[in-house]
Image: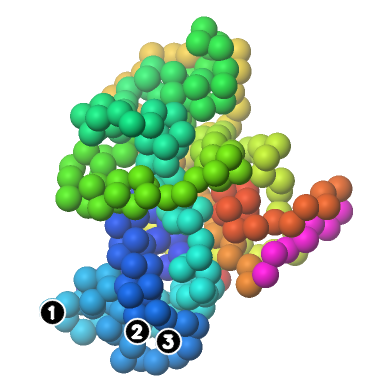
Amino acid sequence: MPITRLTPKYFAAKPNGIHLLNLVSYLDEIDANDSVVYKHKTLLKILRKGMKKFVKSHPELREVDIFKQTLVKFTINGLRSTPLYEINMGILVMCAIERLLYPNESCEFYTNVYKCSQNSAARYYRILCDLPENAIVDSVTAKSARSFFKTDTFTHERANVEILRTYVSTLELDEEAMRSIRSLSIHAIQGDAVDEIPLPPKNILPMESDDASTSTEGASGSNVIEPGNSTDDSQQVLNAVAAAVPLIIPLAPVYSENHGFTRKYFLGQVILACLHENSGIF
């Protein structure tokens, strides 16, 4: 029987936003600190009471160890202080749609967005990038945009969606946070460097290339090529950031080397900054 691998990529995958939120909410509830990762019984309690995992079964030691390593990489304080849209792709999509592009719309409206066609996704992409309404988006970018915006989890799991929506609606997002959401979203769609998100230093090792439940097709480029016809059964290029994004959670801000940047790299800037550099850590 396959083991449950609660890796950083697991928590980054679109369908697992609710599990990430449950985890962080429970860590807040018990006022956890980094010492909890070294207490086996506490880890089991977090898994069962916090994440509702292994409620009627006992996890293998390897499963607990993988979870422990993930918490060490994230750090407990990092999880508790980081906006979850910087970790989970599904929450990023919801923030992009419901806070940035179309605030204060109905649940029915949002459900239709999350079922979007390729043509609709191209329209959302133009708005996201502040492009003219008649700007042509090439077919590769349109397909990638559909894979970003189309989120089946948000159309099927209504109870979980409302929990996530409550979290997203209560986030205090200033202008800088909105810019971050926009940049992370554009970067996820394009798969290339975005001005607002400089490439991280080469000396940072990407985390985790284990299973993420879904594969990812590369997608890059935008601009002036006539889009092809969309197909509703097209595979999702970015179904889950887990399949393509090596998460990098530095314990402290990291400074660039040989990139000409003087700014610091924070978590939100690096999570989606190296989509094509997968390598494993455990």
Disc 1 marks which amino acid? Lys
Magenta span has 254? yes
Q: Secondary structure at mark 1?
A: loop
Say above or below: 269 vs 97: below
Rendered image coloring scheme: rainbow
Closer to us: 36 or 218? 36
- For the N terminus, the image quarter is bottom left
Q: Residue furthest top?
A: 134
Disc 3 marks which amino acid? Val
Closer to us: 196 or 210? 196
* Gap between marks 2 and 3 measured at Cα: 7 Å
Query: Which residue is at 51% across, 74% downward?
Result: 77
* Gap between marks 1 and 2 measured at Cα: 16 Å
Q: Is residue 72 left or right of residue 57?
A: right
Disc 2 marks which amino acid? Leu
Circle nearer the viewer, 1 or 2: 2
Q: Earlier in the sequence, mark 2 or mark 3?
A: 3
Q: Position of residue 156 (x, y in %)?
A: 18, 42
Q: Position of residue 116 (x, y in %)?
A: 31, 26
Residue 36 marker? 3
Q: Position of residue 31 (x, y in %)?
A: 40, 79
Query: Which residue is at 37% across, 75% downward?
Result: 27
Quarter where residue 271 is shown: bottom right
Quarter where residue 129 is shown: top right
Circle nearer the viewer, 2 or 3: 3
Region rendered in magenta? 252-258
Say above or below: 29 vs 168: below
Q: Visible in this render: residue 261? A: yes
Say above or below: 47 vs 228: below
Q: Earlier in the sequence, mark 1 or mark 2?
A: 2
Residue 56 marker? 1
Query: Which residue is at 60% across, 13% downward?
Result: 224
